[in-house]
Image (spheres, rainbow, N blue to C red):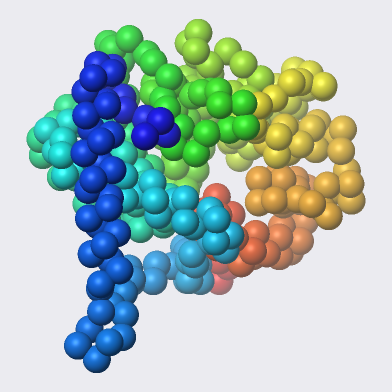
Amino acid sequence: MTYMIMEGGPMKTRLSILGIIASFCISIISCAQGNDTADDGTAITETAEPPRMTLIGTPLREPAWSPEVKARLEKDLLIAEAVMEVAPEREDSYIWLGRRLGYLTRWSEAIEVFTQGLETFPDSYKLLRFRGRHLARYREFDRAITDYKRAAELVEDKQDSYEPDGIINARHQYLGSYRSNMHYYLGQTSWAVGDFQATLQGMERSSRGPLVQHADRLVATTYWRYLALRKLGRHDEARALIRKVPQNLELVENFTYYKGVLFLQGTYTKEELMPEADSIIKFAISMDHHFRGEQETAEMMWQEIIEGSAQGFWPAESELLATRKETP
């Protein structure tokens, strides 16, 4: 089970035993699922979560995964469930079961798992960090911010470490640390409640520390710092900041953030980027329209971003919602 990342440094013997038992549990689970039928012979399926909505009331959807990706995500979940069965005393078991549920957009179940874990590990900054992330995805922003702030307090006097990715990048390289990610997501989530000063502060703190001195962190945090400064009316600071990002950076994964930054610099034009633009790039373009006073175009783009993403895009949702509240 080499792709089951166990945090906390257990001995190899422990991992081997868990791997063997997990395989056995998975075979039992698979057999049970194969026989999961009603009396009339029809298949019994899990009850789906109630549909969640974006901030503007449009439904969130399951991503259009390929069959291969969906099968891999479900297999990873089975492994996490099996490990929880054999090692419920481990903090990692709750972390990975919750994360695997989250990757399948089963957010309420993930939140429940993290909450159960916190009953056993009440001072776990890791469980708070991941519950906060899933609460944000569930649009429970105030609760998410509370979790992030508590996690940041708890981790402050701890030695920082890399945070394992559940879906690793092409280079199999970890880029975020626990401390930096907590501040990053606290800052990003603060955007949703209109606290742009907290967004700026979170991104600045996320950039600190020896583990995150790389180009991927630079472009992602600069993107949000620039936008937050503009929202705060500190336009000259924002322009000076964005100009500091060099061209021809070597990245591992944050390519679209980099293109967004280069657009905000003026290196790329809207016409060059739009044909293949994702939500990150489109949001940069939409905010540029917003700052130029081209509000109708900005609102049209925010709507397009939200409708074009299965899971919405809550920075655009919050901007559009704020605009609608201002309109008499």
Against 307, residue 194 (above or below) is: above
Q: Position of residue 124 (x, y in %)?
A: 21, 28
Q: Position of residue 154 (x, y in %)?
A: 24, 21
The residue depicted at 52 percent of the width and 34 percent of the height is: 168
Q: Position of residue 231 (x, y in %)?
A: 61, 40
- Quarter of the image where the C terminus is located: bottom right
Name the side, left or right, on which 266 lies relative to 12: right
Q: Position of residue 139 (x, y in %)?
A: 39, 55
- Quarter of the image where the N terminus is located: top left
Against 150, residue 59 (above or below) is: below
The residue depicted at 23 percent of the width and 32 percent of the height is: 18
Name the side, left or right, on which 49 lies relative to 203: left
**Residue 202 in view:** no
Between 34 and 264, which is closer to the camera in this rendering? 34
Quadrant of the rendered structure where residue 229 is? top right
Between 81 and 252, which is closer to the camera in this rendering? 81
The residue depicted at 71 percent of the width and 60 percent of the height is: 301
**Residue 217 in view:** yes
Name the side, left or right, on which 288 lies relative to 121: right
The residue depicted at 28 percent of the width and 18 percent of the height is: 12
